[in-house]
Amino acid sequence: MDARARLAGLAALLTALHVAAPAAAREPTAAEAQSALELYKDGKQRRESGDLPKALEKLRAAYALVETPITALELGRTHAMMGHLVEAREILMGVARIPVRKNESAKAHEARTEAARLADELKPRLATLTLKITGAEPSGGATVRVDGVELPPAAWTAPRIVNPGRHVAEIERDGKKTEKIVTLKEGEALDVTVSAPAATQASAPPADGPPEPPPPAPEPKGGTSPLVYAGFGTAIVGVGVGAVTGILTLSKASSLDEACRDGRCPPSAQSDIDSGSTTGTISTVAFIVAGAGVAVGVVGIVLSGKGDAPKQGRASLALTPGGAMIHGTF
């Protein structure tokens, strides 16, 4: 009984400790294998000719089609030649995670060993950037970026592995931004202090309640009535016309006094008599109109002196057989 119990316990332990073998990698298709091989060869040729960007493009495409230790090794080497030490080491370390394929060649096995060695060789060449943030807390609404990549608040001040070369650290808050540009050498560790822009201060409410409303606009005061301009303008015109025609009438009368003797005038003086009569009538009417204009102007002055804005007045003059009449609304 005891022996069977021990055997059952051992079986359970073996089951619990059993680790499944890793699943075999999917074998690439013939088309994928051929395409990857051509891209690999093209990439190496371009690298040997000095065209590193194009070589990187070809080797990256070959590795995307078929992940092999050999392609990964050459892709990592190309990254390292371009100064991408972080990317190179990541790819080289990933070679150990590539499943071993059926009938893997000795060259592939050597590539695994070389990739591990090169990854260890690159480690001390990596640079380290550590930010020191002032004027902002992780919960304060600011955003921190390094080379355009936003950092999670918990990692703002954590050491960050970067490639040697130029880097930009920036803090943004309330639409304002401050930045610090630094250049790191291979293997250098640098602490960089970046000050956050000042936070926008919210407007404080007034201590004594809401502000008082603005005073009402002053009521418009009365201006000069248009009757003033109309009346006195008419008076000026009337006086001018009356004076001119009056002078003409007096001139005609003087001429007739000389031509007419004993109350009789010759036929040749008839035109002067008619002309003098006409100008005399015009002069009389003009002076009457001028007087009426003065009256209108006086009324306008009276209305302009009142506090309320004057209503629009209108005045007109009309000639009548007895002189002139004034019509108006005030």
Image (spheres, helix red, strand yellow):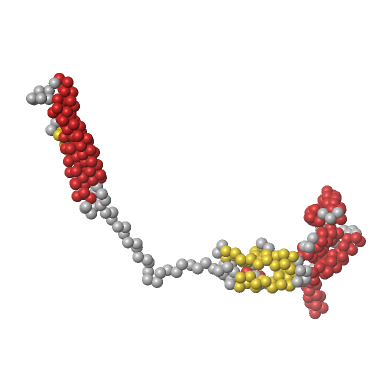
Percent x, y for residue 136?
58, 71
Residue 119 seen in render: yes
Looking at this view, name the residue that lies furthest to the left.
262
Q: In percent of the image, x 16 and y 35: which residue is there?
A: 284
Q: Is residue 115 above or below residue 31?
A: below
Q: Residue at x 80, y 53 (%)?
A: 54
Horizontal side of 59 relative to 173 (left or right) equals right
Count of numbered badges drawn on the protein: 0
Of 223 and 274, nearer the camera is: 274
Position in image of residue 160 (x %, y %): 71, 69
Q: Residue furthest toward the right?
A: 106
Splitting the image into 4 quarters, where does residue 210 fall?
bottom left
Residue name at image x 79 percent, y 60 percent = 82
Residue 159 vs residue 4, the one in the foreground: 159
Q: Quadrant of residue 93?
A: bottom right
Q: Nearer the viewer, residue 21 or 10?
A: 21
301 vs 86, left or right, is left
